[in-house]
Image (cartoon, coloured by chain):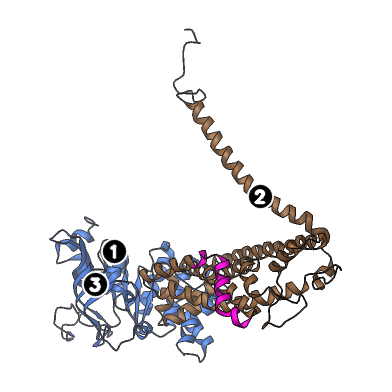
Chain colours: A blue, B brown
Amino acid sequence: MSMTTPRIDSGKLGELAATPDGRGAETVFAVSDLTVSYSGNVALKGVDLAIQKNFVTAFIGPSGCGKSTFIRCFNRMNDLVPGARVDGEVLYHGRDLYGANVDPVEVRRRIGMVFQKPNPFPKSIYDNIAFGPRILGMKQDIDERVERTLKHAALWDEVKDRLKENALGLSGGQQQRLCIARALAVEPDVILMDEPASALDPISTSRIEDLIHELKNEYTIVIVTHNMQQAARVADKTAFFSVELREDGSGRHGILVEYDQTTKVFTNPTDKRTEDYVTGRFG
Amino acid sequence: MSSAQITDPYDITASSNNLGRRRRIQKLVSFVAILSAALAVALLALVLGTVLFKGLSQIDTAFFTKPAALFGEKGGIADALIGSALIVGMAMIMAVPIAILVAIYIAEYAGPKAASFFRVMLDVLNGVPAIIVGIFIYGLLVVGKGQSAIYGAMALAILMIPMVARATQEILELVPRHLREASLALGVPRWRTVYSIVLPTAIGGILTGVVIAVARVAGETAPLLFTSSITQNQISFDIHNALPTLPVRIFTLSESPSPDDQAAAWAAALVLIAFVLVMNIVAKVIANRKRRSLEGG
């Protein structure tokens, strides 16, 4: 990495220099002092971090560290949980994601999400892809859009002859790639993936990982994973979250421990807790 | 070594402790349970059998095509079938949209406290005796304006709403959360997610609830006695006046001293019970078919 490339921000959000091919040159999300609580119970506390454009950013950490809670702040999915409260600031290209005049429906169009368990609609393969664009008014050339996004998600060759069949007849790995294609079909800027391969077999997992490599040139990808090898394989940057016991004994919450280039996090972590986790001594 | 004295400590064919007693209690409990189950089925068989035995011989084509008897001649139930179909049909049109919207509110929009409040209210409404609903419509509308099929339909609709709403709400809550999230995460608004994803997924269960509710209210007599019972016993499609209905017809025929009328009452009862059975089978078929398509067949 060239040292002459200027850092976007030398602040505390952990931006890195852009890669030679220009990835990472912009900040997509700037998160400051983010705290999430559910019905008054703090789940994640005081996170500062920046997500850079066209980088794959992985969130790792033990169960209960708040990594899934955190990723759901980027598309305001936490709004749907009764009693959830998000404090702090999330800037999306410099705009306040939680601003009073921001409609979460529009946020979710721009910031797509793929879930842990493949969740295709109980409709045909074609309708799964066409559903979003139709409702969002992208009605021209739906056929072409379906083909394009399925090719993009490396699924076209497997399903082109059975587009009218129920998507639930696909294998788990195919269903998950269909879900990725469905997210791509509404032309998002960012794709959030919440443990996208945890329910899949190793071959399907590696196809998803290949897909992530393909997609990062066009999209900014944030991925939560409990699989450290997966983070090491796909991510440019990795954030390690951990669980902190509250001093007053009222419970525990997640914190961000370390955020850096993936190779640094895995080979030369700064924090003892990160080292213990990535070397398998904890979690 | 006298073999008779040596006992095998691992002999699992021997009985120990109170095994005999445990066996006897086990047998007794399962016997009583089986007997009770058999009794329930036997009661149904008895009711069906009696109605079948007493009613079947009366049924012929004319029974379905002719209106009620006037003086002594053998009558049919065509007028009552038409009245029942009109009244139940109108009740369905009134109740189903409201019930589905109530269910959508409870399952998709209400907070946990409001949802539990409305669930309890629907259960209370469901428990209101049909005759009370009849008196309510009678006092509110029939007094002063006279009986009408529309008022009868209103009374039946009041009975249908909590049934359909609760059934629908329970089905909506069975629609997996991840399907809603998948839709919302695409930037699809909440109402559109409900309309395009949640309702189509739940449609089988909703139809099942509607069919069962139709079968239930089709046999309701008390509310119709107040709202649509003073009739001409002629074939009529005039919903602004009282129309004859199957349950009210069964009631009046069975009150009659004439043996012909009493026989006709059994036959009408057979028609009603057959309708209810068929509706329940239809509901089962819909539910099964929809479940299969959800599982990806």
The label nearer to you, 2 versus 1, is 2
Magenta segment includes B260? no
Q: Answer with mark 1 or mark 3, whichever residue precedes in sequence.
A: 3
Magenta stretch, main secondary structure class: helix
The label nearer to you, 2 versus 3, is 2
Establish if B135 lies above or below A140: above
Establish if A37 lies above or below A75: above
Asked whether the residues under marks 2 and 3 belong to the same chain, the reply is no
- Name the residue rendered at 49%, 26% in the picture: B12
Q: Which residue is mark 3?
A: A36
Q: Amino acid at mark 2?
A: Leu
Establish if A242 lies above or below B79: above
**Image spot of residue B282 (x, y percent):** 65, 65
**Image spot of residue A179 (x, y percent):** 44, 74
For residue A205, which numbered disc appears in the image? none
Q: Amino acid at mark 3?
A: Val
- Name the residue rendered at 20%, 61% in the picture: A252
* Occupied quadrant, residue B181: bottom left
> Residue A31 vs residue B146: left or right?
left
The label nearer to you, 1 versus 3, is 3
Q: Which residue is mark 1?
A: A228
Q: Which residue is mark 2?
A: B43
> Residue B169 vs residue A23: left or right?
right
Q: From which residue to which does the magenta span run?
A: B125-146
Crowd class of label 2 (few under 14; some 14 to 19; many from 20; radius 10 Å) = few
Q: Chain of mark 3?
A: A
